[in-house]
Amino acid sequence: MGSVDGLLAEGSAALARGDWTGARTKFEAALEVEEMAVALEGLSDALFWLEDIDLSIERRTRACMIYQEAGDACRAARAALWLAISYLSALGNGAAGNGWLQRAERLLEHAGPCAERGWLLQLRAKVTPDAAALVGAAREALAIARRYGDLDLEVWALSEQGRGLVSLGDVDAGLAMLDEAVAAATAGGRNLIIVGDTCCNMLSACDRAADFARAVQWCEVVGTFARRYNAATIFHYCRVVYCSVLIATGRWVEAERELQKALRAVEQKYPAEKVHSLSRLALLCVRRGRLEEARQLLGGLETHGVAAEASAALHLASGETVLAGAVLERRLDALGDGLPAVPLLTLLVEVHLARQAIDAARTTSERLSSIAERAKQPPLHAQALLSAARVAAASGTAAAALFERACALFEASGMPFETAVARLEWAETLGAADRAIAAEDARLALSRFEQLDARPYADRAAALLRTLGLGSRPGPRMSGPLTSRERQVLDLVSHGLSNHGIGERLFISSKTVEHHVGRILSKLGLRNRAEAVAWALRHSSAESDAK
């Protein structure tokens, strides 16, 4: 074996074990001897994982040109497809991504039968919102992968077919296929970009199907794999989806902290991924009554499909029901009646009822029920029941049984916020007709909302208790315990950060930070930031001693 061949082999071995720096060194050394497309591709892979995305793309582009000049249309097409994926997924550059996708298709016009045709088919389907088309294309790509023994394509096609089936409501079959795909992907030796996409498909499907236990189990596997191959960067989206599990299961403080970490990790190198973190943070802010923060987080994302739920929730909470409805209808037109539509349809029912459009709310609720019935997942069935109960209550028909069933299913699914919402609305329906039961449900809901720091909902539960003449906690008090956000701000104050610095860290405005600092000082009976720092350090020390 010659020296160049040896360097190429050593570089490939370094890639296989996740030694990106070592791989870069070997491939660069090989290129000093001779410019070869295979060395450029290996270097491009190493640079990608070292987060030098621009240089990675430059090297892959050169490799594509060399393959073209040599008349190797299939390998040139595969390089073009890699560039399309990188522009679309990592950089969010749709124009460049589509351009390279078109280039790959043009190259394959002059090639014979090859596995790359399956890759092209798969990527074309991935960028379409049509889940049925995705499933069909994935099946065809899977057949091509098996014909040519392309294991990476086989794993990816299995994953995409599973994702499409879940979106269409065939949850059991889709998740079973995704289980197989992730097991094969994380067994080792696969293209890590495909591994990352496969894992993200699994966690996204778990999120849509509200299968939190499965998501947690696969997150453990994915985390172990990412650490083994030093490949954490490609799993940022998986981390964000896991935060959705944290939100659904009531671990809001942890979710907010992890989302902020995820946002900081991607904002420079992977701008296309920011929308996932920002939209989930914004939705959490809306639930906690921090509407100005949510508005800032969503700035510039008003037309982005991923942010539709958070944008509509913000509009609804702000009393902008026409805007909320428009955002939801536009996104639903693109999604159809698959599982991704469930949270949007749930919100749309609320929007219609806020506008007293009961017939429209009923039609939307029935649409939601149809999806939930196909999916056969308890949390989705609970969402449909809650929407049906809301419509029944607004129509003046019996709703208590629907609220009761929704509440029971949410509770069994481990979803405390949704349980409390269903319990509160059930109590509102009962009202004075059954004062004792209504009061008990309102108190239970109030306790849960206070634990979550869901202030608008806590205030609503407290108002119901006052209406029932049973008393409740007073309105927002400046002498109560610090909220989770106020504790975050106080911690950053104790580290010497200015309002501007705190705002940058928490993705809020300096004015909002000033508001939080004022509430902190008032609640703790302090006069200035210096006293706040002393208080924070003293209590931090006390907590450490207690441990």
Image: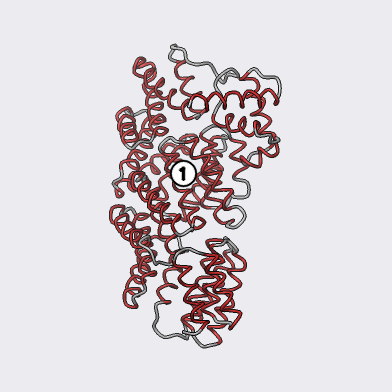
Residue 199, percent from left and from top = 41, 56
- Mark 1, Cα crowd under 10 Å, few <14 / some 14-19 / many 20+, is many
| Total numbered circles | 1
Q: How is the image coloured?
A: secondary structure
In this rendered view, identify the residue nearer to me: 524 or 307: 524
Residue 56, percent from left and from top = 58, 68
Name which quarter of the figure residue 200 lies in: bottom left
Residue indicated by mark 1: 243
Disc 1 element: helix
Seen in the picture, residue 37 relative to 235 is either above or below; the reply is below
Would you say residue 338 is visible in this rendering? no
Q: Is residue 155 left or right of residue 52?
A: left
Residue at 53% x, 62% y is 49
Residue 411, percent from left and from top = 33, 33
Seen in the picture, residue 479 relative to 325 is either above or below; the reply is above
Residue 303, percent from left and from top = 57, 52
Residue at 35% x, 69% y is 154
Would you say residue 491 is visible in this rendering? yes
Seen in the picture, residue 525 relative to 275 is either above or below; the reply is above
- Three-letter amino acid code at disc 1? Cys
Q: Is residue 212 left or right of residue 454?
A: left
Name which quarter of the figure residue 363 lies in: top left
